[in-house]
Image (tube, rainbow, N blue to C red):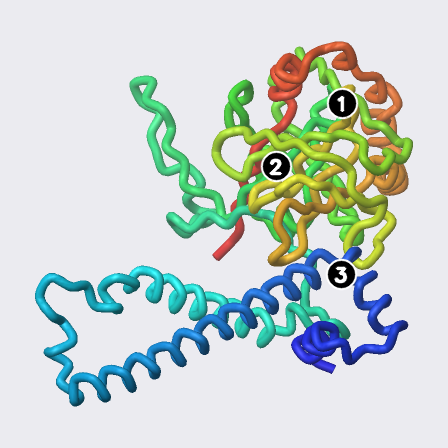
Amino acid sequence: MRSTELFDDYQNGLMSEAERRDFENRLGNEPILKKAYEEHLQLIQTLKMTASRNQLKQQLKDVHAESFGGDARLFSMKGQETFAKKHGKTIAVAASTALIAVLSTVAALSTGGYLLKQQSNQITDLNRVVMELQASNTAIVEGITRNNKKIAYAPANLEGSAFALNNKGYILTSFHMVKNADSIFIQNKNTERTLAKLIMSDVKLDLAVLKIENQELIQNWQVPFGIKDKVTDIGEKVFTLGYPRNEMVYGEGSISSLSGYSNDTSMYQISIPVNPGNSGGPVLDEYGNIIGVIRGKISGAEATGFAIKAAEIIQSINALATDSTKKDLSLQASKRTTLKNLKRSEQIKRINPYVFNVLVYKKD
C-alpha cells in the first residue's frame, strides 16, 4: 500500500484498531514518516482551501454575470476596491502554498523516500566536494615561494575532518574521504598544510588512520582529550568540531539513540546537524572525552547524524595495527582527559590544535 493511501485510511478512520496503533507507533518512532504525514495533511488542507477559493471565484463570476451583463469593466467602479484587488495577496499566498506543497510532496513520494515498506533513505557520506577547480596530482601547488610570498594551493578534490589519536602524529578520519587518494594533507590554524600518509583502514567501519610525515611538527604535541571506550548513555550531552567550511565549526546536542542507521550497533545517533565536511570529525562528551567519530547522516533528515562508537574505533585499530606500529598506536595513554573541569570555550581552545581539515587530492 502506498504511503498516501495509508495516510488517507488513518485520517478517514478506515484502519482496524491494531493497524491504527501500529501506525501511530511508527509516527512516534520514525521522524521521516512523521514528516511525510504532516506534509500530506498540509497538502490536503491546501487543496481544500484552493477548492473553496475556486468555488468562491465561480460564485463571484455568476454574480458578476447576473448584475453587470458580463462586462468586466463595470466591476472596477471608481472609488471602490474590487475583490481581486482587496484580497489579491491572500489569493496569491494560498496559490503559492498549494503549488509548493504539491510539488514537494509529489517529489518526495515519487522518489520512494516516504514509502512505508521500501524506504530509499541511505546514509550519506559527509565529505565536502570542492567544485571551484578540478585538482590534479600534477598541480598540487600552483604558487611560488620566492620572496616569502605565501603559497597558493590548488583546491583539493575532497575535504573533511580528522583528529589526533595520540602525541605521536597519528590521526583518525573517514575511509571514504581518503579512498584512492593520490595525496593527503592536513591543516588547521596551528598547523600549516602538511603531508599525511595512510597507514591503515577499516572499510567496514569507514575508518582510516593517517600519520604525519614531518616529525618536527609533532614534537611538542600534548593531545588534551582521551578516548572513552565505555558506551555513552542516551540523553548525554555531546559536541562536535569539524570543517564543513574552511573555518572550524562547533555543534552541540545529545545522544539520541544507541544504534545508528538500520539499527547498526557500531554507531550512535546524535541530535546534531552534520554537513558535508564533517566526516571524520570527533564527537566529545562534556568532559572532553572522544566518544565517537562522525560517519554521516540520513538523506533528507535534518539535525541528525551518526557517529562510530569509540569502543569500535579502539577495537578496530588494535586489530589492524601491525607489530611495528602497535606500540605507537596504543591508545591506552590517551584515555585520560585534561579537559574535565574546564568551561566549554576553554575546552575548545585546547582541542582546536588537534582537530584538522583534511584535504584529499585524487587523480583525474
- Secondary structure, mark 2, is strand
Residue wearing tag 1: 286
Rendered location of residue 50, percent (x, y): 44, 74
SS label for mark 3: helix
The residue where tag 2 is placed is 161
The crowding category of the residue bearing disc 3, from other C-alpha atoms within 10 Å (few below 14, some 14 to 19, many at least 20), is some
Amino acid type at image mark 2: Ser
Compared with residue 310, is residue 351 higher up or lower down, i.e. above or below?
above
* Of residues 186 and 23, the one drawn nearer to the viewer in this rendering: 23
Name the residue type under label 3. Answer: Leu
> In the rendering, at what x and y percent does residue 195 appear?
57, 32
Residue 114 is at least partly visible in this image: yes
Task: Name the foreground residue: 324 vs 7.
Answer: 7
- Amino acid marked by disc 1: Glu
Counting residues from the start of the chain, the first of labels 2 and 1 encountered is 2
Which residue is the site of mark 3? 27
From the viewer's perspective, tell me whether residue 164 is left or right of residue 90. right
